[in-house]
Image (spheres, rainbow, N blue to C red):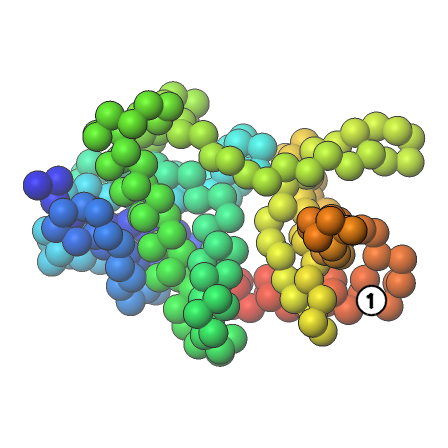
Amino acid sequence: MPGRVLALDVGQRRVGVAVSDETGLIAQPLPPLVRAPALEDDVRAIAALADRWQAAEIVVGWPVNLNGSVGPQAEAVRPLAEALQRVRPVRLWDERLSTRGAERLLIAQNVRRERRRQLIDGMAAVWILQGYLDHRHQFETGVTGMADDKDLFNPGEGEAEQEDEVIVLTDEDGHEHEFVVVDVIEVESREYAILLPIDAPEEEEAEAVILRLEKDADGDDILVDIDDEAEWEKVAQVYENMLDEEEE
């Protein structure tokens, strides 16, 4: 049997935790860990969890930028990931959009916002772990087109490709820019897509673009500009509030 796998969604204040079943196929959440002032205390707490669940390896969420480059958030995770190598073999797994995906899953299950705040860390870790387990299972069973696991300290090697939804927008000067859809939110019975630029410089904070989702004559989804400034401000405020809640 492959054995259990422990997964971590590392934040500044908390660490979301998930563990697989003994077959290494299904992820389930565990209570999050509160970060300790000292790195070694975090390592000891995670080592105790790995021992308790008899985990054969640890998967650490790697928060790379949307364009795949390594930014400050990913570098902040590196010290803990490196230290955990003394505990178990460590795998790095691309966690782009894991928190947003976890929240969409909880929303789909009609979980109230207050409860989502309590569950989001563990569910983000589940999202990371389940993606890793599915990828590993497909690779081990010989499915073609699957890359090997990403090397933790050589991020460019063996990276599994992710199919993000990319939108190309043209600015006022006629230049095209690629955006990735990071979320779809509902405000007053209307749906809006939140887009972030793929090619934004690492040193600059990416500015979100908000477009309204509508249906065309054929019933297909289309994205349209928001002409009403008050409508745009309302949607932007809802999205900012959601981000603030995630950081608390």
Q: Does residue 220 lie above or below 121 as drawn?
A: above
Q: Quadrant of residue 232?
A: bottom right
Query: Would you say 106 lies left or right of 185 here?
Result: left
Q: Does residue 2 lie above or below 158 as drawn?
A: below
Q: Does residue 15 lie above or below 158 as drawn?
A: below
Q: Nearest the camera: 222 or 94?
A: 222
Query: Would you say 171 lies left or right of 42 here?
Result: right
Secondary element under disc 1, as helix, strand or loop, is helix
Q: Quadrant of residue 13?
A: bottom left
Q: Residue at x 69, y 49 (%)?
A: 220
Q: Quadrant of the N terminus?
A: top left
Indicate the position of residue 14 as horizontal and vertical percent values.
Answer: 39, 61
Q: Residue at x 67, y 44 (%)?
A: 196
Indicate the position of residue 191 as horizontal and vertical percent values.
Answer: 68, 62
Q: Nearest the camera: 222 or 162?
A: 222
Indicate the position of residue 199 as horizontal and vertical percent values.
Answer: 68, 31
Q: Which residue is mark 1?
A: 231
Q: Does residue 180 lie above or below 38 as drawn?
A: above
Query: Would you say 73 lies left or right of 8 here?
Result: right
Q: Residue furthest front?
A: 218
Indicate the position of residue 209 as horizontal and vertical percent values.
Answer: 74, 49
Q: Is residue 154 visible?
A: no
Amino acid beneath label 1: Glu
Q: Quadrant of residue 45?
A: bottom left
